[in-house]
Amino acid sequence: MPILDAKGLQGQLKNGTIERLYYFYGSDILQVESCVKKLLKAVGGDGDSVTRLDGANLDLDQLADEAELCPMFADYNCIVIHDCNLERMREDARKTLRSILENVADSTVLVFYVTGFDIYGGKTGKSKKPTAKNKTIIDYIAKHGTVCVLEPKTPAAMASDISVSVRKRGCTIGQDAAKLLAEECGCQTLTIQQELGKLCAFVDGGEITVEMIRNMVSPQLETTVYELTKAVIRRHPAAAMQAVDELLAMRMEMPYLMGVVSGCFIDMQRAVVAKQNRRTVQDVTADFSYRFDFMVENAFRDSRGETAAHITKCLKLLCDAERRLHSQAVNERVLFEQTIAEMLR
């Protein structure tokens, strides 16, 4: 079976196709949970007819027994396993789990879904993949069942969803404001819904404006990193250090944070080199498999007057900082601040 998104799953369920094995994962946690609920509804699963197992403490003997049961009062014997991380399982346990999957009864629907750990192992970028051991089970289920990957929608598509949600709450929002909110929240459904609750309560039936979003929406990791990158490139120390404070306040793991910052500088470097070689936004988007056009558009816009040599120096400083981070006992906060300060010189 092909890898599906939310729309693909909806079409599959509408056609009445039910598989024995499912695996749901992705960066948009709310979409993951929503799709699992849609599947359970389609198979007639309710509180009593669904067996829910904790993947972090998975009892494989219990799972084997449950997977062979025949449903008594429902069409399917439905088993849902939340946050089963194969990276933390012993090799013999992984083999046992694989054997269970190979012998699931035809009347059983076995569902894995992930919302509580980073299945990508901290990797970012356009080519990120699940970690190796988790990928083994995903690949098996993709061949013998359905895998559904729920990544954020594009800002334009998310803006339409935002407009509908705002209208249902008795408020209004313009297209520009809706798209800005999507971008500010990294197109994360859960984050957007949280921010909409706050904004709609504030306007109380009125209009949500671009200015309100800029003033009221909590800064997200990617957008704050982008503001940091712009400030460094434009050599605005005050703005850069403000972004640093906001990032450190998020209490992200430093290797992950530095990886995101490096990725943003790489976007800028690609834009600079592309412009030097008379390549377009569309060329870069296609060549490097960007999901969102606006990321490349912003990089083209904000890298005006910049040189690849300067960005390369910044990337070297980040590389040196990451090397020190993994090889020495350092104060992570001080190291990050010092690195940004060096990049501003």
Image (cartoon, rainbow, N blue to C red):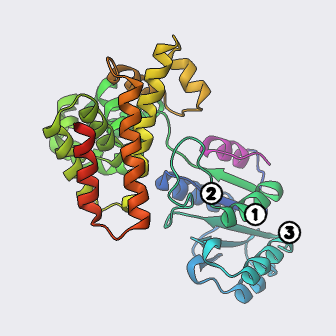
Give the mark nearest the N terminus, 3 or 2.
3
Quarter of the rendering containing residue 269? top left
Please name which of the two marks, 3 or 1, marks the residue nearer to the observer: 1
Residue 44 in view in this figure: no
Q: Amino acid at mark 2?
A: Pro
* Secondary structure mostly taken by the magenta-highlighted segment of the chain: helix
Three-letter residue code for mark 1: Leu
Disc 2, SS: loop
Q: At numbered mark 3, what does the secondary structure look like: helix, strand or loop?
A: loop
Note whether 98 is above or below 248 in the view shown.
Answer: below
> In the current view of this chain or complex, which residue is farthest to the left?
238
- Given residues 34 and 81, the one toward you in this image is 81
- The residue carrying mark 1 is 21
User: Going 37% across and 62% down the picture, which residue do you hit?
Assistant: 253
Q: Which residue is mark 3?
A: 106
Farthest residue to the top: give it: 278
Tell me the kind of residue under disc 3: Asp
Q: Earlier in the sequence, mark 3 or mark 1?
A: 1
- The residue beneath circle 2 is 130
Which range is magenta? 1-14
Instruction: Please determine whether, in this image, residue 242 is positioned above or below residue 136.
Output: above
Give the CA separation, mark 1 to mark 2.
18 Å
Residue at screen point 31% across, 51% down: 194
Q: Residue at x 28, y 58 (%)?
A: 335
Q: Is residue 212 left or right of residue 98?
A: left
> In what element is the residue under mark 1?
strand
Mark 1 vs mark 2: give the one in front. Answer: 2
